[in-house]
Image (cartoon, helix red, strand yellow):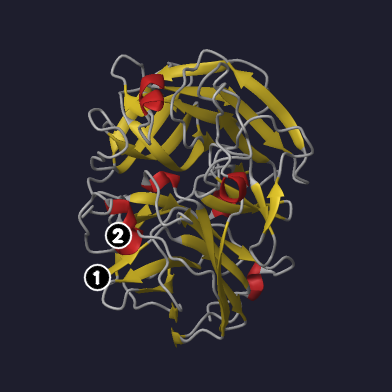
Amino acid sequence: MTTPAPHLVGNFAPVVDELTSHDLPVTGSVPRGLTGWYLRNGPNPHEAASAHWFLGSGMVHGVRLEAGRATSYRNRWVRNSTFTDDAMVYDELGNRDLTAGASNTSVVRHAGRVLALSESTLPYLLTPELDTAGAHDFGGKLRTAMTAHPKTCPTTGELHFFGCGMLTAPYLTYHRTNAAGELTVSRDITGVGSTMMHDFALTAEHVVFMDLPVVFDVERAISGLPMPYRWDPSYAARLGVLRRDDPHGEVRWFDIDPCYVFHVPNAHDEGDGIVLSVIRYPELWRTDSGEAYPVASLWRWTVNLTTGKVTEEQLDDRNTEFPRIDDRLAGLDARHVHTVVAASHPRHDPVPGALLRYDMHTGSVTEHTFGPGRIPSEAAFAPADDRPGGEGWLMTFVYDASTDKSDLVIVDAGDLGAPPVATIHLPQRVPYGFHGSWLPDPGTRVGDVGRR
């Protein structure tokens, strides 16, 4: 008898039903001003099998909130060309199909469009009912894949992102849209290898790329390994800095200690430099590509643009991931970073689930624990007022091993030690996944949300 892979059992296993359920039961009180959707994307292989956790077909889970009620839950697969037609990212001749991939990593909204994202594909448009409306290539202008971690500038409304290639140079292309969602900048960045670039950083004045020593290995790909990347100690780790006011200008490179970073909480300009917060791994996939995950913790990098040096500082030693901020402060000096303590990969042992709130100004950390057998996912921030960085809530799907179901839990971001404000009980479990967003209805005034 074959033992199922770790990413196909427990709460990593896919769910098989697409449901629509109404009038969800709630313990506590949903804040009355929260009207919109909480959406989260993650892998959910539609044939109940995949070679790696990262490769399962994307499924978006959504909970609808309206004026103090949890009115519905809905989950739908992202029906991209791989899902519908078994399309491959690369064919036998090496030709790339930008509509093919998993579409399983994040879901965001920009210029009125809701996009399901993963870094191997074009974005896919979702309807308000979470049905798939097709690939979105920005009117034929986007000719690369799109990162799952685009950044929206809160000042200009521009969307910044990048696309990566694996087989042929250029391996990195920087893109920018205006606030209306029209692609206005696409420029190739030369001198970069075929590395696994998952995230980047944005400030008011700069874009920062992370060129790190996890590289594409064609021999692994040919041999059929599900994750064709490996640690390369000979590949230098560095940060590339591009001025936003000169998007086709010089990219300056700054050496850092070897490491890997999946996620950047935020970055901002400060004096003659740039300050980044990152969730840093000391290395990744040195001996067992796609499976071995060392401890990741919160670090600060300070780039001195005058001296060319980067100061690297560990802020905490706790194993944590999936950082989020108040997105209205993206690229600015956001005081608080929220992260998750949980089993972040199927080969990690379960740990007591918690949310952490880091005060980046004082260094203090507060914690919300969920109790035995209750494991949270990434927590998105929902504002309670019009002040960026002000009061608000954290929303996270929490799996309960005792019931084999999941809840959407809402906690007060400013009082993590308090019990949850609301626990919304879902009709089925939500498998562990990746990234999501709180999407208030268009026209909703944040100041109307209130504390209750």
Splitting the image into 4 quarters, where does residue 4 fall?
Answer: bottom left
In front here: 88 or 264? 88
Q: Is residue 9 left or right of residue 90?
A: left
In front here: 134 or 149? 134
Q: Nearer the viewer, mark 1 or mark 2?
A: 2
Kind of element beneath mark 1: loop
Residue at the farthest front position: 1
Return the disc, 1 or 2, that comes first in the chain's sequence: 2
Q: Position of residue 385 (x, y in %)?
A: 59, 68
Q: Position of residue 370 (x, y in %)?
A: 29, 71
User: In the rendered image, is residue 243 in sight?
Assistant: no
Q: Is residue 53 left or right of residue 36?
A: left
Q: Can you identify the residue that label 2 sits on?
A: 9
**Amino acid type, callout 1:** Gly
User: What crowding class fits label 2: few (fewer than 14 Cα within 10 Å), some (14-19), or many (20 or more)?
Assistant: few
Q: Can you identify the residue that label 1 sits on?
A: 373
Q: Quadrant of the N terminus?
A: bottom left
**Amino acid type, callout 2:** Val
Q: Is residue 137 above or below residue 109?
A: above
Kind of element beneath mark 2: loop
